[in-house]
Amino acid sequence: MGTGEPVRRTVWLDSADPESVRVIDQCLLPFEYAEVSIRTAEGMAAAIRDMVVRGAGCIGASAGYGMYLAALEARYMSGADGAAHLERAGAALEASRPTAVNLSWAVQRQLGELAGITAGDERVTRAREIAESIADEDVASCAAIGQYGLGLIEEIYARTSRPVNVMTHCNAGWLAFVSHGTATAPMYAAHDAGIPVHVWVSETRPRNQGARLTAWELGEHGVPHTLIVDNAAGHLMQHGKVDLIIVGSDRTTINGDVANKIGTYMKAVAAADNDIPFYAALPSSTFDPSSRDGLADIPIEERDPREVTNATAFHDGHQIEPRVAAPGTGAINYGFDVTPARLVAGIISERGICRASEESILSLYPEFVGGVISR
Ligand code: MRU
């Protein structure tokens, strides 16, 4: 999964039945590897909501394919009815999860490019092409992010001549995108280039995407890694055991505020206190150029409190949810937090590394001048 053609994708069209989209069921990993077929736009919205597919890039690409499924459903409708069906399907997909902007970016791209096509078959063909492009672009972007991020790891290795300790949070790996991942792509690239790299993987309560998904991914690729509880991150930084932090992002404002899995902000604060560079790795589909204030503007998903009061585990081949909180205790479950740009050393994008500032971001992405995501 280094720089070459990826081994697997998280979402793809079924070659035997191109009216069906295949995904990896990420709720079962790493205890069971299962693929499922999704045949309706509504089914895709449910898969995103229930986190069968998850991670910003993966749900963006899945939404792109969801719109293709909607176009199939609208194939024999009149032009106006078909357009209304696509709008409804797009709204349902966008509503399935609020924070990752890749979702609405993909839906709006489909709606924008399909607007004006009234013939059902033509709309299906175009929606399929767009969905495939979104997925292919995600793969290419993540591969490029890997190469740019590799430079950071190479530089530390050249200076220290010892294994480079990188910390990450949650899962911004290939499972969170179509392939490669963002935060993990430089780690894979470094490992493939023979640079000794070791990754601190924080478990990322409550859903444990670090313990379950990132640890699994890194292990499959042979990248040395160690699991820590989320609360150990600051301790490791204080003791000089972290050279670099790379996280993903679900939405990044045009001035460089980064929304990412809950707990990211605390890592960034501890990193600043210990002079450790804290980078966010993200493709352009994760920018929200309409926002300059992450705290004010970015909607933060609140999930079922049971994810906090209960753990999820696999036992005898079954998923179980043993309670960990005292009976009767209430909980609140924020999915994401916002790390202000001032704590972000840089953004690793598919066009290079820039500072977390509007000027620097716009120098790489001049098309965002004016603050709109073009449909
Ligand atoms: O809730 P999830 O699993 O969809 O959250 C996404 C994440 O894993 C992260 O926040 C990630 O670091 C950025 S998304 C690639």
Image: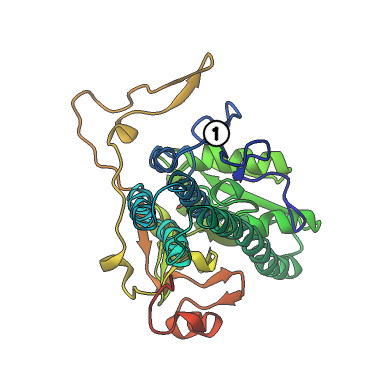
Which of the two residues, 101 or 282, is positioned nearer the viewer here?
101
Q: Position of residue 220 (x, y in %)?
A: 70, 39
Q: Quadrant of residue 193?
A: bottom right
Residue at (64, 51) in percent of width and height: 179
From where the camera sits, is residue 276 visible? no
Q: Quadrant of residue 108?
A: bottom left
Element at label 1: strand
Which of the two residues, 155 or 188, is positioned nearer the viewer here?
188
Which of the two residues, 231 or 66, is positioned nearer the viewer here?
66
Q: How many marks?
A: 1
Residue topped by disc 1: 37
Q: Is residue 95 above or below residue 361?
A: above
Q: Position of residue 239 (x, y in %)?
A: 54, 55
- Does residue 228 appear to the left or right of 7 in the view shown? left
Quadrant where the C terminus lies?
bottom left
Mark 1 crowdedness (10 Å alpha carbons): few <14, some 14-19, many ≥20: some
Which of the two residues, 5 or 187, is positioned nearer the viewer here?
5
Residue at (65, 53) in percent of width and height: 180
Q: Is residue 197 above or below residue 298?
A: above
Residue furthest right in the image: 194
Query: Would you say the beta carbon of the disc 1 residue lies within 8 angstroms of ligand 1?
Result: no
Q: Position of residue 139 (x, y in %)?
A: 64, 57
Residue at (51, 72) in percent of width and height: 345
Residue furthest top in the image: 316
Q: Amino acid at mark 1?
A: Ser
Q: Position of residue 84 (x, y in %)?
A: 33, 55
Colour scheme shown: rainbow
Q: Is residue 216 above or below residue 274?
A: above
From where the camera sits, is residue 302 visible? yes
